[in-house]
Image (tube, rainbow, N blue to C red):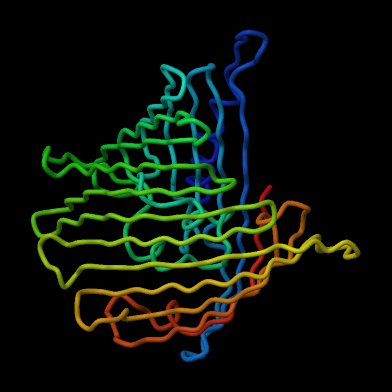
Amino acid sequence: MIRKNLFIVLFILFPALLFGQKTDSIRYPKLKVTEILVSNYEHAFEAGTNQFSVKNSRVDAVGNFTENISYRGQLTLKDNGNFNVLDLSATFMPVQGLSLTFGQTAIPLFNPYVAGPSSMMFATRPYIGDYFLSTRDVGLHANYQFMAGKIPVSVEAGIFNGNTINKSEWRKDKNMSYGARLQLGAMQGARATVKFYDYPTSGELHYFFYGADVRYEGDNWKIETEVINRDNKKDERDDLLSYYVQGAYGFPLKKSWIFKNVLPAVRWDALKKGHEGSGMDVNRLTVGVGFGLTQKYFSSLVRINYERCFVDREIDILSDEKDSDKLIVGLILVL
């Protein structure tokens, strides 16, 4: 198993270490490697259980073969101690603003600050990041970026196998998955998106996702909200609805020799399955504080989170430890 994991890591890094050519005084390939270490301690109060984990730690390699061709390979450490491939793709940029990505890549539905550990405000994802769909699939993804006056605009669309991550199978035309997203604004400042994703998994399941999100990020603070609905076209009892609102504000620490800033954060998220009742089935309050290890906000830090769940109706997708009241103490290092 160790040999297998080592082979995967070397396979992703190998192209950047082997080839090189000069183009307009720029040497290719250019390579950037980011390592993310996530280590958590969790205590579930109601179950009286504890765990230490290093799951969701990642190695991400991004580079350029030429001026118009780039590649990406990203691995994540899973609960069983094995590395799984998250991203393995090549991107071609035929004209300015247009990129075409082939391979296993992110579908145009989820935001990086929901699913990516280096961008998340908290040690755990909101319900949207946990219970809806895998964040990646194998296929073709197109992204066209341009300026509408002073507003950055991004239009994304993609077609995928519909088998989710690390799995390729022959599918009939009608069973291919496809989706699109329109984004106004950038990650810094104001940003808003609308998106949909059609996911016909089999003859018994056919999911359709749609949602929207709005966020604003300043130098040392940000606030985000998002709502996503999952319709099961075969059985409305399996429909899902979820939303979250979260925010954080950073304060510099001038005299601390270990911590450079402190980041209080709060999140409210909710989940509903089916259509019974008028309210949400589960609501959750998460409060936390992060202690930054660098001058950069929302990066490497030690964080302490407390989660309080309010269950109005028991639903079968919840787990005793994962969705109970919890204390989480974690460390994230972005290298």
- Frontmost residue, 30 versus 13: 30
Who's the residue at 45% across and 28% down the image? Answer: 146
| Vertical arrangement, residue 70 with respect to residue 263, above or below | above
Q: Residue at x 77, y 62 (%)?
A: 261
User: Where in the figure is residue 335, as x and y percent of width and height?
Assistant: 68, 47
Seen as rendered, the residue at the extreme right is: 255
Q: Is residue 5 or residue 88 the one in the foreground? A: 88
The residue lying at 62 percent from left, 69 percent from top is 265
Q: Find residue 50 and report its horizontal and vertical position in percent.
A: 55, 82
In the foreground, 114 or 247: 247
User: As drawn, is 68 to the left or to the right of 167?
Assistant: right
Residue 59 picture location, percent across and down: 57, 46
Q: Is residue 221 above or below residue 181?
A: below
Query: Where does the image place residue 156, in percent across and percent down from the top left?
Result: 36, 37
Count of numbered circles on the image: 0
131 in relation to 298, above or below: below
* 207 left or right of 42 in image: left
Q: Residue furthest front?
A: 149
Q: Residue at x 30, y 49 (%)?
A: 164
Q: Nearer the viewer, residue 243 or 107?
A: 243
- Image quarter for residue 220? bottom right
